[in-house]
Image: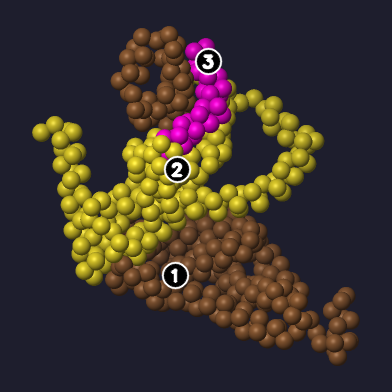
């Protein structure tokens, strides 16, 4: 008797086999193939036990809350989404980046033509570094304020963190844009830290406006456990160093400064 | 009326209600889109979580899918239903996200591997391994770890095909549209995914089954 191939058995199990009836008949008559199918099913059954988190009964409402402000007045016209204020701010940063790169590139063109490509690249990176540095600075300040927030006294039952929450929502948009830009630029290290920051910002943005002292403590512990403040500071410092390193070279007349920069 | 008939009626009612909500959204009623978001978020989340393997990315995929759905709603034709359509958008975005994640993980893996090399001589790491733990717990944890790794080792296309077919019960044509592939190639992708999962997991699944037969695993 010719046995079923693994491919046929998998196709049968996953409901995509063309000769389903023929395979069924074969399985009824062939113990070996039945055992083989059971082994495939055991693996699939184990995979079915993988847990699936429950996003909560009001998840749909949360998603709407997250995206409502980012929707244009009318659907269907892609450019309208970019006219929404928060996206405009983020898009503005990118436009500024491109325009500045172009202008700076034109200025540096006056130098050695052989260095044009490298100079443009440096200018582009410098501007990205400045923009991301500012973003990290804002994020750090918000997280520090949140980490230091505390109830006014033992009797206070709730702490208002709506200001931090709104800032986290704004920063989230920028963060996503910078993370994607960093990835496109091949800066995986920066993208990785921005990704971790995004998770924290998402947590804060998802928090209720008013939190109990226990909830506040839980948020603060989460921030602390992830060490995100430390990572943000380290990356920001690195960005500052990159910024300094990519400053335009001094003119040849300024020999003293030139010598000093070599150290 | 039997339960199957009730389900069919309910699915039709949702599809009709979705079509009305889409029409109203296109006419400028933004709140109508809210109905669609609230109705389909759970399903999209389930798909996104299965594909990306983590909650954070899944939530991003859900939001992005509905944002893109809104932006492209003018291109949505009444021929298909909204749920399937937004599902497809989510699957495509999840593939992009998985690619990004792989790049990020590859970068993180290098220093981690170095750390692990350094830990080989750490006596504490040996103590941890030798610590007595209930066998069944160890096996469950090990199997869970292996399953996560086996899924992560699939290519984006394989994982997408497996998730959409095995867990979400999508048709081959629907999966083929997401993968931008032919039906036959998509079937092969499903096969390759299950084959790889089987190679990676069968020893662990059988060990657990043997343990269960011997009474050391509940």
Provide the residue designation for mark 2: B160
- The quadrant of the image that shows the C terminus of chain A is bottom right
At 32% across and 52% down in the image, what residue appears? B85
> In front: B49, or B137?
B49
Question: Dots 1 and 3: beta carbons under 8 Å?
Answer: no
Please give the range of residues in magenta: B186-215
The colour one sees for chain A in the rendered image is: brown
Nearer-N-terminus badge (3/2): 2
Q: CA distance from mark 1 to mark 3?
A: 54 Å
Provide the residue designation for mark 1: A166
What chain letter is assigned to the residue under label 3?
B
Q: Is residue B208 left or right of residue A107?
A: left
Residue B177 makes an appearance in the image: yes
At 87% across and 81% down in the image, what residue appears? A260
Magenta span contains residue B31: no
At 40% across and 52% down in the image, what residue appears? B90
Tell me residue A218's x, y (percent): 51, 55
Tell me residue B39's x, y (percent): 27, 52
């Amino acid at each position: 008797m010719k046995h079923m191939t693994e491919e046929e058995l998998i196709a049968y199990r996953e409901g995509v086999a063309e000769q389903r009836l023929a395979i069924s008949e074969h399985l009824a008559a062939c113990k070996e193939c039945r055992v083989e199918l059971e082994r495939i099913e055991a693996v699939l059954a184990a995979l079915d036990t993988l847990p699936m988190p429950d996003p909560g009964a009001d998840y749909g409402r949360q998603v709407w809350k997250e995206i409502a402000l980012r929707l244009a007045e009318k659907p269907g016209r892609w450019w309208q989404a970019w006219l929404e204020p928060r996206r405009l701010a983020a898009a503005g940063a990118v436009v500024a980046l491109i325009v500045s790169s172009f202008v700076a590139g034109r200025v540096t063109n006056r130098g050695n033509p052989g260095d044009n490509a490298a100079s443009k690249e440096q200018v582009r990176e410098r501007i990205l570094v400045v923009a991301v540095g500012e973003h990290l600075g804002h994020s750090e300040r918000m997280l520090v304020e949140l980490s230091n927030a505390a109830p006014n006294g033992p009797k206070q039952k709730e702490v208002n963190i709506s200001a931090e929450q709104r800032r986290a929502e704004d920063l989230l948009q920028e963060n996503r844009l910078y993370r994607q830009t960093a990835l496109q630029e091949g800066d995986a290290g920066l993208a990785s830290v921005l990704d971790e920051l995004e998770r924290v910002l998402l947590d804060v943005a998802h928090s209720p406006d008013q939190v109990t002292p226990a909830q506040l403590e839980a948020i603060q512990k989460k921030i602390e456990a992830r060490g995100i403040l430390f990572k943000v500071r380290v990356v920001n410092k690195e960005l500052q160093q990159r910024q300094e390193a990519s400053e335009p070279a001094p003119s040849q007349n300024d020999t003293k400064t030139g010598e000093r920069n070599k150290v | 009326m039997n339960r199957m008939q009730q389900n069919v009626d309910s699915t039709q009612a949702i599809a009709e209600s979705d079509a009305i909500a889409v029409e109203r959204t296109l006419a400028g009623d933004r709140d109508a889109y809210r109905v669609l978001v609230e109705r389909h978020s759970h399903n999209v989340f389930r798909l996104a979580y299965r594909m990306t393997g983590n909650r954070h990315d899944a939530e991003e995929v859900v939001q992005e899918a509905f944002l893109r759905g809104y932006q492209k709603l003018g291109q949505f034709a009444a021929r298909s239903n909204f749920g399937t359509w937004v599902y497809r958008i989510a699957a495509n975005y999840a593939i992009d996200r998985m690619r990004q994640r792989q790049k990020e993980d590859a970068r993180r893996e290098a220093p981690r591997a170095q750390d692990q090399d350094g830990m080989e001589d750490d006596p504490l790491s040996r103590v941890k391994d030798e610590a007595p733990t209930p066998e069944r717990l160890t096996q469950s944890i090990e199997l869970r770890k292996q399953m996560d790794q086996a899924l992560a080792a699939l290519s984006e296309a394989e994982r997408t095909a497996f998730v959409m077919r095995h867990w979400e019960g999508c048709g081959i044509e629907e999966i083929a549209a997401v993968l931008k592939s032919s039906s036959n190639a998509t079937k092969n992708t499903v096969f390759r995914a299950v084959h790889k999962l089987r190679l990676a997991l069968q020893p662990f699944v059988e060990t657990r089954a043997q343990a269960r037969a011997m009474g050391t695993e509940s």
